Amino acid sequence: MPKISRYFIKSGLLYLLFGVLFYFLSEFPGAKWEIHLMPVYWHLIALGWVTQIIIGVSLWMYPKGKKSTPKDGAVLAWIAYFSLNFGLILRIISEPWIYQHREILILPFCLSVILQFTGILCYVLEIWPRLKPQK
């Protein structure tokens, strides 16, 4: 299994753990949170857990074809990994406070959206050539 796949899968499992923790905290009886944790929970589960597990397994399982990639993974795959994860971390930090009208966090929030989009785009560009029909 390539190193990049292991990183995506392990990161996905960590996001699952933190997503369940955020859900537990947001639904804890008697807890009155001033911040909204449910949007963070959904991002942790959808983009953090599910998407990263899918990306990790697909980079591992889909053949590379004639294109030679290093054992550690292709540059586009690493850009996807770091962009997606930095974007998610920025989102986790900024999103709960957006609903509190903290304008200072608009910039990190917008940057998180750009980073997440960049990560997904790099993944698509990396995996697309591998999806050719067999001859």
Image (cartoon, grey):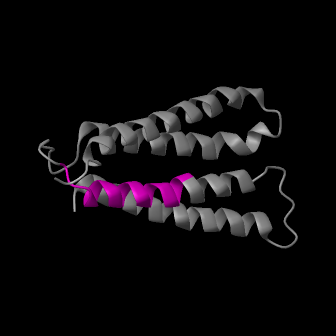
Q: Position of residue 82 (x, y in %)?
A: 40, 41
Q: Position of residue 73 (x, y in %)?
A: 22, 47
In this picture, residue 78 sits left or right of residue 51: left
Q: Is residue 111 above or below residue 133?
A: above
Q: Is 56 a magenta residue?
A: yes
Rendered residue at 22%/63% (across/down) = 1
In this picture, residue 116 sits left or right of residue 53: right
Q: Is residue 41 above or below residue 123?
A: below
- Residue lying furthest bottom in this view? 29
- Residue placed most toward the observer, 123 or 90: 123
Magenta part, dominant SS: helix
Rendered residue at 27%/58% (across/down) = 60
Rendered residue at 29%/48% (across/down) = 131
Q: Which residues lie in the magenta part?
A: 47-64
**Quadrant position of residue 75:** top left
- Residue placed most toward the observer, 20 or 104: 20
Q: Position of residue 74 (x, y in %)?
A: 23, 42
- Residue lying furthest front in this view? 135
In this picture, residue 124 sits left or right of residue 38: left
Q: Position of residue 55 (x, y in %)?
A: 39, 54
Rendered residue at 19%/49% (across/down) = 64
**Quadrant position of residue 11:** bottom left
Q: Is residue 113 above or below residue 26?
A: above
In this picture, residue 38 sits left or right of residue 5: right
Q: Is 82 a magenta residue?
A: no
